[in-house]
Image (cartoon, grey):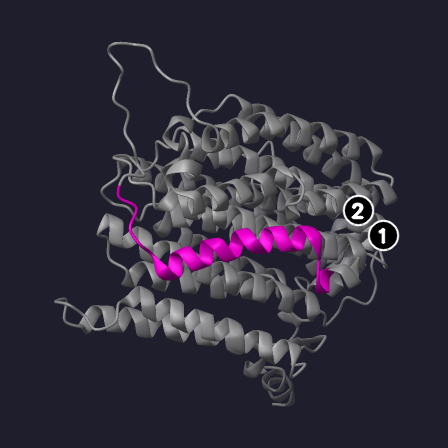
Amino acid sequence: MEHYLNFSNTNIWSEIWPELALALAAIVLLGIDLFRKSDKPIVSIGSLAIVFQAGLLIFHLFDYLAWHHTFDRETFSGMLHQGIQGDVMRTFFLLSSLLVSVLGHQYLKNKKLRAGEFHHLTMLATAGLMLLVQSNHFIMLFVALETVAVCFYTLVAYNRESAKSLEAGIKYLIFGALSSSLLLFGIVLLYGVAGNPEAWGANYIGYEGQDPLGFQYLGNLLEANPDHLLLRAGVVLIIAGIAFKIGAAPFQIWVPDVYHGSPMPITAFLAVSSKAAGFFVLLNLVNGPFLGMSEFLMPLLGFVATFTIFFGNLAACTQRNIKRMLGLSGVAHAGYLLVAIMASMQFAGDSDRAVWVLFFYLFIYLLASFAVFGVMTIARLNDETEHEFSHYEDLAKKHPWLGFVLVSGIGSLAGIPPFAGFVAKLLLISIAYEAQLYFSLAAMVIGVVISIFYYFGWMREITFHPKPSFSDEEEEKEDPWLNVPRMGLFKFCMLALAVSSIVLGIWQGPFGDAF
């Protein structure tokens, strides 16, 4: 009885109130969409989702900054760990979810698709992501990860009228199942050894009564047995499963195809939130339970980071389809972020600076990615998956505000001053140098130089006038910018992203103290 009483005392539900609020609101929105009258509703589902998420984000920030709600403690019998880093990532996911709903509201109106299920799944996926980054136990990690994955399987194939969207959904389902299998197999290997160390020749005493899937216990076990073959195999399989989620080579094969076919807001969601969650989970693992295997993991992660940087940038150079190019450039960014993960391992015990550089890079990547995908969302193409460079010719002249937002997003992704992406890459280079990761540093610099080719090629189409044609039979091209609607909230959000990217490129605000 006492055991169950202690268990219930650790179930502090108030610590996960943002996740509970999101899940409840998702159910309410689905119910409203199901039972309301379809003819001329007073308020759209998209507007309700945006207002709720904006209010939740503001309240969460007020709670975090003014009330100091954050505690560095474990809850739910060690399943979850709350702390300042987790709260920063929860803010990140709430902001990302709000922007996905803003893009989705515009996208769903253009495509005449149902809004209820879209916003329902987006909010549930966000709640899952927020629980995922607080996971302190492999069961919690796997359940949260699969909750997110199931939502994404549906969202990727949400445009049922598009064969490419359905194809992308099938591909994402297959590769997602494969990554989950690798991850689960790795967890099983760790559990098998941790559950009975003597049976597998592991050197660890005092394991009785401890949870063999808890991060703390596994950290002690791995530290005591860094050369154990089964434990190494389990760690490698878990990292391989996470590498699928973040799109790191050689597990990146799904990225261009899924980005190509997904609805535009979901492409942005995958590029930002899914990638960020994967990196934060990896950060927690390599600086937590896997810290005892740092000597084994460092060269492995170094190879993956270098391969990822070169593959992503070189493959992106050959692309004319912009969604595939952005997918492959996202692979390259995954390589850059892996260098930050390695730097945090080098500064074990004093890795805060490397962690905050990683956070800053992720926030800047969010601003730039949503700016780019936001502009692409309102392009009126017969086939939304076929965005070519030629569709953006002279956009800055036709619609100056769209050109400004798009150039600021691309410039930040490329790392061009005065955009914040330049500062993010500079900080990443600095932290890699301090960690003495010279080989990865060289790969990162070369990768940034290569990326200039495809980023500047797109910027040239946007900002410079096309060459005059002297052909008598000039081919009529599809112009996706003829009837751009007036969008108050959408325009405000896009301009805010662009301006924020410039401001953070000059002044880093609260992040500056952490550097």
Question: What residue does disc 2 label?
Answer: 343
Left or right: 382 with respect to 64? left
Q: Where is residue 326 in the image (x, y as percent from the top left)?
A: 50, 36
Placement of 305 over or under 510, stated as above or below: above
Q: Is residue 503 magenta?
A: yes
Say which residue appears at 69% left-offset and 36% top-offset: 305
- Work out which quarter of the rendered image holds the C terminus and state it: bottom right
Q: How crowded is mark 1: few (under 14 residues within 10 Å), some or many (20 or more)?
A: some
Q: Are marks 1 and 2 in contact (CB under 8 Å)?
A: yes
From mark 1 to mark 2, how far is it between C-alphas?
6 Å
The three-letter code of the residue at mark 1 reads Phe
Q: Can residue 188 be seen in this view?
A: no
Left or right: 283 with respect to 476? right
Q: Where is residue 494 in the image (x, y as percent from the top left)?
A: 46, 53
Label 2: element kind: helix
**Which is more toward the observer, 427 or 485?**
485
Question: What residue does disc 1 label?
Answer: 347
The three-letter code of the residue at mark 2 reads Ala
Q: Does the magenta stretch include residue 179?
A: no
Q: Where is residue 106 in the image (x, y as percent from the top left)?
A: 32, 54
Q: Position of residue 509 (x, y in %)?
A: 70, 62
- Find residue 281 and report its image quarter: bottom right
Placement of 448 over or under 140, stated as above or below: above
Left or right: 36 with respect to 203? left
- Find residue 432 and report its image quarter: top right
Label 1: element kind: loop
Q: Can residue 403 be seen in this view?
A: yes
Give the residues drawn in magenta, as a range: 483-511
